[in-house]
Amino acid sequence: MSDNKVILGSEEWCSFPEIGIPTIKARVDSGAKTSALHAINIAPFIKNESNWVRFDINPIQNNLKTVIHCEAPLIDKRIVKSSSGFREQRYVIQTDLQIGSSTWPIEMTLTNRDSMGFRMLLGREAMGGRVLVDPAQKYLLGQPTTEVLKSLYKNSEQASSGLRIGLLASNPELYSNKRIMEAGEIRGHEMHFLNIKECYMKLDAKTPEIHYRGGKILNQFDAIIPRIRPSITFYGCALTRQFEALKVFCLNSSNAITQSRDKLYSLQLLLNHGVEIPTTGFANSPLDTDDLIKMVGGSPLIVKLLEGTQGKGVVLAETKKAAESVINAFKSLNANILVQEFIKEANGKDIRCFVIDGKVVAAIQREAMPGEFRANIHLGGTASIIKVTAEEKRIAIKATKAMDLKVAGVDIIRSAKGPLLLEVNSSPGLEGIEGATNKDIAGEMIKAIEKNFKQKIDLK
């Protein structure tokens, strides 16, 4: 029965002639259902009225200079669960696998495997009925020498010598994260997505380190872009601080992110720098609810949980009785709360200014859904282009500098007494503002990193 089957070890070299890959080392894993190929700069396109996908590959492990440009018919998009439990949507292609003297078509998903030990994973769906695996053996079909590899890849393109940039975030499929990765790659940089939950660190006076899943040491990064969810601020900032200890440039510093996430401290900091905000009261389970309501001018008023994000934990109390009920409800949770005057004349609208490296690069007006007072895009708010005033620009820039942020989303509300600052966001979303303005905000973030390194070179 085994006469017609290919016998493989746990690691083998194979090739994909249809997409121009002369040889690549594969992990043969019958425990994995799906085969996967390392790919970066993945982009779908139409060819002869059919769906195709183009992508780049560094076919040799630990060699980021050798690049092959590939394209293949796109047959599907699937959610794949990795060995670490992370779910990712991937493009699926079909192409011929050549291994030894045998060739047959297989399906493969495309994903960045920089952190993995092999550029290729051969799963059981691609092996079914054709292969027997001896897990105790390796390279039963031969192994190319270094000289052979150099010969096979001598005509392949050499990657541009850009910066090595890590995007420290949680979800690679989030619009903002995909755009930042894309923008960096377009500008010739080597981009790496670093999942916060898969990073861990070694604290040591002489050799501090950051490790990634599988024990890979994250070193030799030029820059890190922290995009930290509020729910993991503590750990994300600890990692950012560790990169800073390794002398890696971080687009927003750990200290700046930490203080921007502390709503009370950030408001105190802004006021100390002369930035106007709506009148605000703060209390921990207040006993004198009546005086707290009077403090901000009475009802209607806004009650906010100090730890709330993206409009969550924010309540409009239209009457004094409603305000008392909400405050008492939060009090029963022993929660820290902010009570803030309600700017009725804003009509459910606010302004988001996107500030990068001391300049307002784009601005939008966000408008709440009918019956809603919160204008957050995540809550169904709509975005439109708006021309901001010189005073609004000044406030946005001043607020960003007060928080010591290089990248920030600054939310401003127009009131009868002039523009007032609502919040400064250290990881602002790109989808709403790029969609409304059609500006390459992600590209501006990459330029801010380039500018930092150009200044360093100019100073030498």
Image (cartoon, helix red, strand yellow):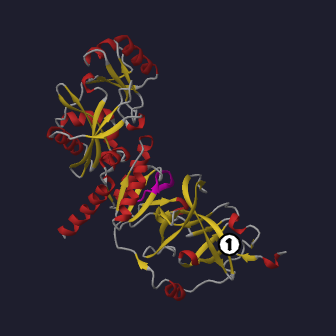
Amino acid type, mark 1: Ser
Residue that numbered label 1 is attached to:
10
Compared to residue 255, the image places residue 217 above or below, namely below
Q: Residues within 10 Å of mark 1 (few under 14, many from 20)?
A: some
Q: Is residue 201 magenta?
A: yes
Helix, strand or loop for disc 1? loop
Compared to residue 181, the image places residue 373 above or below, namely above
Compared to residue 55, the image places residue 302 above or below, namely above
Compared to residue 71, the image places residue 360 above or below, namely above
Front-most of residues 180 and 293: 180
Q: Residue furthest front?
A: 49
Q: Tell me where the magenta segment starts and ends, as one range.
A: 194-205
Visible in this render: residue 235? Answer: yes
Quadrant the N terminus occupies: bottom right
Q: Residue at horizontal 62%, vertical 83%?
A: 143
Q: Residue at horizontal 39%, vertical 24%?
A: 371
Could you say which quadrant of the image residue 274 lies in? top left
List x then y, in percent, for residue 137: 71, 76
List x then y, in percent, for residue 405: 27, 47
Front-most of residues 295 and 397: 397
Q: Residue furthest left?
A: 390
List x then y, in percent, for residue 299: 30, 15
